[in-house]
Each structure stands twice: as C-alpha cells, then as structure tokens.
C-alpha cells in the first residue's frame, strides 16, 4: 500500500533501531485483520446474492452496500449503517492512498522544478491536483469495475509484485531481504496477475 512509506518513516522516528521489527509486527497484524474482514465480507456476499444480483449492481455502478440497502428495504438499519460503513471505508482508502501519492508527487514536483517546489507549497499543489482529478472522476462517474480492470489491476500488480523485487536486487542495502525461492514465486505470480489484467483489456 502507498501508506507503507509513511509507516516506515513513523516507525523510524518513534522506535529508532527497533523500527523494522515494530513495523513488521504492525504490518503483519494489519494484513491478518484485513484479509479476515475482506474475505468474510466477500464470502458473505457471494453466498447471499446471485450472479444476476452482482450484474445488476455492476450495471447500476453502485457499491455492494448500496445494493444491499436497496435489495432489503424492509431492513431499515441497513439504510443508516450502509452509508456510514461506506464513508469510513472510502475515507480510510483515500487517506491510505493519498498519503503515499502525496509523497510521490511531491518528489516528482521537487525534481521537475530543480528543487524550487517543496514544503508547504508542494503539499498545497498536490492537494489541488488530487482534488481536481477526484472531482473530475466523480463528475464523469465511470465504471468502478472498469477502472480497476483497466488501471488498478496492472498498476497494483507491478507495484506489489515487480517493484519490490527490482528494489531488493537493485540496491545492496536491501540485500538481506533476498530469498531466491520466494522471489521467484512472487515474480511468477506477478507475471500471472499482469497477464490476467492485460488479457481482460484485450
């Protein structure tokens, strides 16, 4: 996730020499909780709705929580809980990606301007660019599934599978993280994920 770099900086500042084991513990716990919650929710939806229901939600371009509230209007609790859960999930996802994107865009602006754009000005400019892009996407209201298939899938596959491997073997300071068996497995899975994403675009 893009927020990993922010976590690394925080742990380095707070825990010093113990930053790595602390960060490893935080990430491990977060992954376990995330996988459990997501898979529980996914299996719950898969066992509750039919393929026609999912197709209908896709055609309406609405999230599953909105679809659930519309599907069971007699359950008034869903009308109130659904938007709250969706808002929390969207906010968490936005902040997680925004912090990492802000850091990356600030670096790009700094290098592109030869060090002239930095500090608060860079952060303000990044916030404006992010707001404009987010507003345009919300205005156009494109297919969420389409965006994930066309952009999210290939980009995430590259960032999660290939980029870490490149860094581990490119920089000697990361040599201790090298594991040929696991790295080969990650490389193969990354190629499979990217191939599947490209296949869906063709």
Image (cartoon, rainbow, N blue to C red):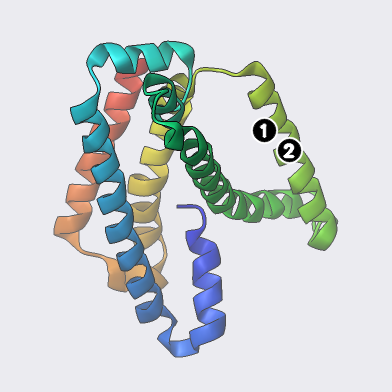
* Nearer the observer, 21 or 34: 34
In what element is the residue under mark 2? Answer: helix
Q: Mark 1 highlights which residue? A: 134
Q: Residue 172 carries which label?
A: none
Question: From what the image shows, is residue 135 above or below residue 77?
Answer: above
In what quadrant of the picture does the C terminus appear? top left
Q: Which residue lies furthest to the bottom in this view?
A: 17
Q: Measure the alpha-carbon separation of dots 1 and 2.
A: 5 Å
Residue depicted at x 33% and y 25%: 197
Residue depicted at x 47% and y 37%: 82
Question: From what the image shows, is residue 19 above or below residue 52?
Answer: below
Local crowd size for mark 1, using a 10 Å CA cut-off: few (<14), some (14–19), many (≥20): few
Q: Mark 2 highlights which residue? A: 131
Q: Which residue lies furthest to the left in this view?
A: 181
Residue 22's x, y, as percent?
Answer: 39, 79
* Occupied quadrant, residue 152: top left
Residue depicted at x 52% and y 63%: 5
In what element is the residue under mark 1? Answer: helix
Question: From what the image shows, is residue 76 above or below residue 173?
Answer: above
Residue 99's x, y, as percent?
Answer: 61, 55
* Occupied quadrant, residue 118: bottom right
| Left or right side of 22 for 191 | left
Local crowd size for mark 2, using a 10 Å CA cut-off: few (<14), some (14–19), many (≥20): few
Callouts 1 and 2 close, C-beta under 8 Å? yes
* Nearer the observer, 107 or 85: 85
Residue 187's x, y, as percent?
Answer: 24, 45
| Left or right side of 15 for 113 | right
Residue depicted at x 55% and y 72%: 9
| Left or right side of 28 for 16 | right
């Amino acid at each position: 996730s893009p927020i990993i770099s922010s976590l690394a900086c925080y742990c380095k500042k707070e825990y010093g020499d113990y930053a790595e084991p602390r960060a490893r513990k935080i990430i491990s716990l977060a992954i376990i909780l995330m996988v459990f919650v997501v898979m529980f929710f996914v299996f719950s939806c898969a066992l509750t709705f039919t393929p026609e229901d999912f197709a209908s939600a896709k055609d309406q371009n609405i999230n599953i929580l909105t679809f659930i509230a519309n599907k069971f209007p007699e359950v008034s609790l869903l009308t109130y809980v659904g938007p709250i859960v969706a808002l929390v999930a969207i906010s968490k996802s936005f902040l997680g990606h925004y912090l990492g994107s802000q850091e990356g865009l600030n670096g790009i602006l700094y290098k592109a301007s030869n060090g002239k754009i930095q500090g608060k000005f860079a952060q303000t400019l990044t916030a404006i660019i992010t707001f404009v892009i987010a507003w345009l996407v919300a205005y156009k209201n494109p297919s969420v599934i389409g965006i994930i298939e066309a952009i999210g899938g290939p980009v995430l596959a590259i960032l999660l599978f290939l980029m870490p491997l490149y860094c581990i073997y490119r920089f000697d300071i990361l040599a201790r993280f090298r594991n040929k068996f696991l790295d080969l497995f990650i490389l193969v899975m990354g190629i499979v994920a990217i191939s599947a994403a490209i296949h869906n675009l063709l």
